Structures are given as C-alpha cells and as structure tokens.
Image (cartoon, helix red, strand yellow):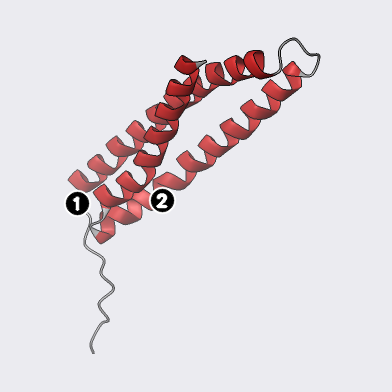
Amino acid sequence: MFTPHTGLRSPTPLGYLACYSLYALLLAGSVVAWLIWRTTILHLIARLIGLNPVNASIYAVSMIVLGLGLFVLVIAAEPYLRTGVKRGQLVSRFARLALPLLAAGLLGLLLGIWL
C-alpha cells in the first residue's frame, strides 16, 4: 500500500559528520560562554555587593545555575541536531542553538569589559 510521507530523508555519513562537527562547536561555545560568565559574575559580585560573607554562596549558586543550563543545552542539542540531519534542517537547527549562545557569551563579555 501507500506509505505516508514523513519528511524524513535517508541520512548520509557526511550528514552525521557535519552534525557532530556542529555539536562539537556548540560544546566548545558552551565552555567559552561558561568561562566568560564565570569572570563576569565575579566582577558583578565585587562591583555590586562588595565584601560580604555571602559572596561565596552567590558565586556557587550562580555557577551551578549557569553550569546546569549549559549542560542541559548541550545534552538536548545532540538529538535535536541528529533529527535535523534526517529532516534536512541541520543548519537552521544549529543556528537556533548557536545564536542565543553566542549572544549570551557576547553579553557576558561586554558586561565584563564594562565593569
């Protein structure tokens, strides 16, 4: 009988190579964004709060929240990009993940320079 058209393509090895290359870029971008925000948060704490006994707690909580957020992004990105290979949407899906990550990194960098 007839098979329904699901919009899926037959993935090629080259498609998966591109997928995991872009995934590695996202992973590297997440690490860079984490490093940028780590120093920016230290500058924000020093500038806004000054010497205070709760500084270590604020820093620890912010690092946990930032680290978990980036970890969830990286973990969710792999199946999202892999499905993008099958649907022919790899570049648009990568852009949907990478552009906000890039914007967040640039914001942290500019904020760190401004402080």
Q: Using the rendered view, name the quadrant where residue 84 is placed.
A: bottom left
Q: Secondary structure at mark 1?
A: loop
Q: Is residue 58 shown to the viewer in this render? A: yes
Task: Tell me the number on the disc at residue 102.
Answer: none
* Mark 2: amino acid: Pro
The residue under the point 58% across, 15% down is 43
Decide: few, some or many residues near mark 2? Use Cα within 10 Å; few <14, some 14-19, many ≥20.
Answer: few
User: What residue is pinned by disc 2?
Assistant: 79
Nearest to the observer: residue 97 or residue 53: 53
Circles 1 and 2: CB distance less than 8 Å?
A: no
Q: Position of residue 55 (x, y in %)?
A: 73, 17
* Mark 1: amino acid: Thr
Q: Using the rendered view, name the quadrant where residue 88 is placed.
A: bottom left
Q: Position of residue 74 (x, y in %)?
A: 46, 39
Disc 1 from disc 2: Cα separation:
16 Å
- Identify the mark nearer the N-term, 1 or 2: 1
Quadrant of the drawing holding the N terminus: bottom left
Up/down of 56 relative to 95, above or below = above
Nearest to the observer: residue 35 or residue 113: 113
The residue under the point 43% across, 21% down is 109
In the picture, measured across the screen, residue 94 lies left or right of residue 27, that is left
Q: Position of residue 16 (x, y in %)?
A: 26, 45
Q: Is residue 31 shown to the viewer in this render? A: no
User: What residue is pinned by disc 1?
Assistant: 12
The residue under the point 67% across, 21% down is 59
Nearest to the observer: residue 91 or residue 36: 36
In the image, farthest residue toward the right: 53
